[in-house]
Amino acid sequence: MLTNKKALVVHHETGSLDDIANNLERLGYNVVALSDTLQAIEVAGKNDFSLIVLDYTIGPGPFDGAGFMRKLAERHANPPNVIVLAKYGIGHHKFPVKTLGTIIGAFSFRQLEQLLPA
């Protein structure tokens, strides 16, 4: 399927990473799935993603979800939309990039799908 929808999925759990990537591909996205934030920020800088699905509580690594978002904002004048996933409440953060929504705790792909841009 030819599509111009490109998504970057950044998640530290392989099972979740694969599930999210497979479901986005089913919806017509070309997906790059990575578990390392440093590699992900490099890939994000070299590609034109329309969406990033980010495990905000990702770790260990060179930086966490907050650090990834800061780097994304620094490197992109117009960063892609981000859907934030978190295992637990992350408070009332003002994210440095536009987010389509935040999902806290266990989730179904249907919840994530409802946040996707049309």
Image (cartoon, rainbow, N blue to C red):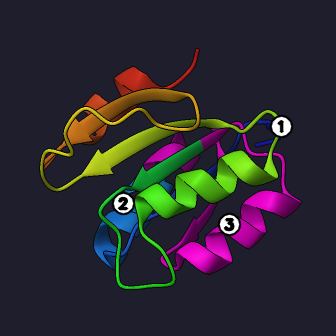
- The one nearer the camera, 90 or 84, is 90
Residue drawn at (13%, 45%) of the image: 89
Q: Give the class, few, some or many, for how many residues have Cα within 10 Å of label 2's Cα (few <14, many ≥20).
A: few
User: If you read the primary sequence from the N terminus, does the residue marked by circle 2 or circle 3 appear first?
Assistant: 2
Distance CA(mark 1)–CA(mark 3) = 14 Å
Which of the 4 image quarters holds residue 98? top right
Residue 94 placement (x, y as % from top left): 41, 32
Q: Which residue is mark 3?
A: 41
Query: Which of the numbered marks, if any, corresponds to residue 77?
Result: 1
Q: Give the class, few, some or many, for how many residues have Cα within 10 Å of label 3's Cα (few <14, many ≥20).
A: some
Give SS at disc 1: loop
Q: Quadrant of the N terminus?
A: top right
Residue placed furthest toward the right? 46
User: If you read the primary sequence from the N terminus, does the residue marked by circle 1 or circle 2 appear first?
Assistant: 2
Residue 100 placement (x, y as % from top left): 46, 25
Which is in the foreground here, disc 1 or disc 2? 1
Contact flag, marks 1 and 3 (Cβ < 8 Å) = no
